Image (cartoon, grey):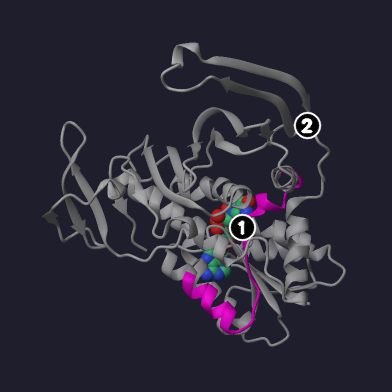
Amino acid sequence: MNIAVIGIGYWGPNLVRNFNQMYDVNVSYLCDLNQESLTRMKKIYSFAKTTQDYREILKDPSVNAVAIATPASSHYKIAKDALEAGKHVLLEKPMAESAKECEDLIRIAEENDLTLQIDHTYIYTGAVRKIKELLDNNELGETLYFDSVRVNLGLFQHDVNVIWDLAPHDLSIMDYLLGNNAVAVSASGLSCFNSNLESLAYITIYFASGRIAHFHLNWLSPVKIRRILIGGSKKMLVFDDLEASEKIKVYDKGVSIQNGDVDGIYKTLVQYRTGDMWAPQIDQTEALKYECRHFIDCIETKSRPMTDGRMGLRVVKLLKAINTSILNDGRKVYLSSGGNNELSSNILVRNILSEDGSSVGYFREDSQMETVMVSKPAGPELNGIRMDN
Ligand SMILES: NC(=O)c1ccc[n+]([C@@H]2O[C@H](COP(=O)([O-])OP(=O)(O)OC[C@H]3O[C@@H](n4cnc5c(N)ncnc54)[C@H](O)[C@@H]3O)[C@@H](O)[C@H]2O)c1
């Protein structure tokens, strides 16, 4: 299998290294606009051809697949050209800049029977795969909440905010572990400097089940934290990605409520259970190695990748919804058709609330937020914004 890597800045060389270690893969091209990066990589991978123009690669029939690690704004164009040229695509996160672009890429890949995998790397870590196994085996009981903190100092990006930079990791983990039944999002964020790009954000995602997930993202934290808590009705789990050996800890802790009816609230008996903690063994294989192998296997067996275009699309929809909520002072943004997290409407609906919280009317706005119309109350289920694409 001949593969080309397009974009060899910070992340691309990791893809090159992993594909190069595979016995059945030949890294046949390296591509970057920056000649210095090409010269540097050519010293290590002298056998690979180099080019500054990815279209040269797409014209070469010997190339079977491309891995694209360029900035997010270029993902759609390069991936679309590659799929239309008949190449399988491993595309960096976030998949594209809009749901429409993601849908286009999914359609072209499906029509041409090509593998389209999105590099949501965390899904391929031994830790996340172990958590999935524990949840699938009902080890924690019913999932009550998902709480994620991903903060550190920098790296400030010049083209995306902290949400588009960091949240794809956590949103893809949530999607993989809890399923794709998010119904709404509310978020607040802050740009600490003179820019319109948020450097910290607090995000809540609401599920059809009534449960919530919360995310704290921050480029301006003096300490680095990479931690996810999952509360279950039977046990609770902490995933600390900075722990060297015991990344996952499962706590046999919980609360049981007895006589908990509303009238008898003062008689309610709260029982705390504090049992053992255990740290399961996890596979230490480098996530990207596992992922690159998975990509090649999916091409060869025509199977659907764990992080396929549809997961990439769901993550992009959530990212868009989060940005919209921040722009609207943290109001809830509803994803269309609930559980499937698929958007169908181009209409934004925003209730106007009276002081006592009752709805007195609503705005309908088109996707450019230009047309404003006041009408009768929209009903409590639309007490927020219906998201466009
Ligand atoms: N999966 C992960 O864990 C992970 C980690 C870091 C970055 N990323 C993703 O990887 C992508 C790249 O991020 P980065 O940090 O490596 O950025 P970067 O700026 O360091 O590298 C991007 C490279 O792409 C090149 N490039 C841009 N347009 C190009 C074009 N049209 N043709 C060829 N080359 C082009 C640039 O010259 C640059 O060298 C982003 O989408 C980012 O989100 C993913």
Q: Nearer the viewer, residue 47 or 229?
A: 229
Q: Which residue is mark 1?
A: 9
Disc 1 marks which amino acid? Gly
Q: Which residues are magenta?
A: 103-127
Disc 2 marks which amino acid? Glu
Image-quadrant location for residue 263:
top left
User: Mark 1 vs ligand 1: CB under 8 Å?
Assistant: yes
Q: Nearer the viewer, residue 283 or 91?
A: 283
Q: Which residue is mark 2?
A: 246
Q: Looking at the image, which residue is at 46% across and 41% down? A: 210
Numbered circles on residues, count: 2
Q: Nearer the viewer, residue 39 or 274?
A: 274
Q: Tell me if I can see residue 33 in this picture.
A: no
In this view, 236 is above or below 382: above
In this view, 103 is above or below 141: below
Q: CA distance from mark 2 to mark 1?
A: 32 Å
169 relative position to 206: left or right: right
97 relative position to 195: left or right: right
- Quadrant of ligand 1: it is bottom right
